[in-house]
């Protein structure tokens, strides 16, 4: 059985915590950010867990973790 390749786009967008949770960054982080209030832009900085329905798809793109 050959080795599986990691999807490089997914590798950059997602990270796996020590406990095994898949985390993502919210979209809209860099473009048109000046118009938004500070409270909103602060929310973009934190990592958010991936929705359970999407986990299996993303795990397939990251066969060996990140």
Image (cartoon, rainbow, N blue to C red):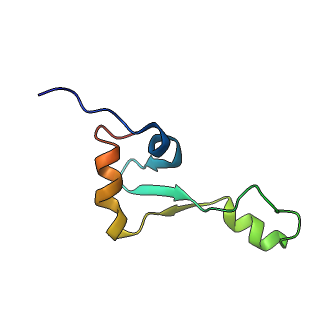
Residue in the picture at 78% in, 73% down: 39
Question: Of residues 2 and 50, which is closer to you in this image?
Answer: 2
49 up-or-down from 16: above or below: below
Question: Of residues 45 and 7, which is closer to you in this image?
Answer: 7
Residue in the picture at 45% in, 45% down: 10
Residue in the picture at 39% in, 47% down: 18
34 up-or-down from 19: above or below: below
Q: Would residue 24 be found to the left or right of residue 28 on screen?
A: left
> Going by the picture, which residue comes out furthest to the left?
1
18 up-or-down from 49: above or below: above
> Going by the picture, which residue comes out furthest to the top?
2
Looking at the figure, which quarter contains the N terminus? Answer: top left
Q: Position of residue 48 (x, y in %)?
A: 52, 63
Q: Position of residue 53 (x, y in %)?
A: 33, 70
Q: Would residue 51 be found to the left or right of residue 5 on screen?
A: right
Query: Is residue 20 visible from the viewing direction of this image?
Result: no
> Going by the picture, which residue comes out furthest to the right?
34
């Amino acid at each position: 059985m050959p080795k599986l390749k990691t999807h490089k786009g997914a590798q950059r967008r997602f990270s796996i915590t020590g406990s095994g949770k898949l985390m993502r960054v919210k979209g809209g982080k860099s473009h048109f950010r000046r118009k938004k209030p500070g409270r909103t832009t602060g929310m973009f900085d934190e990592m958010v867990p991936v929705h359970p329905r999407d986990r299996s798809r993303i795990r397939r793109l990251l066969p060996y973790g990140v």
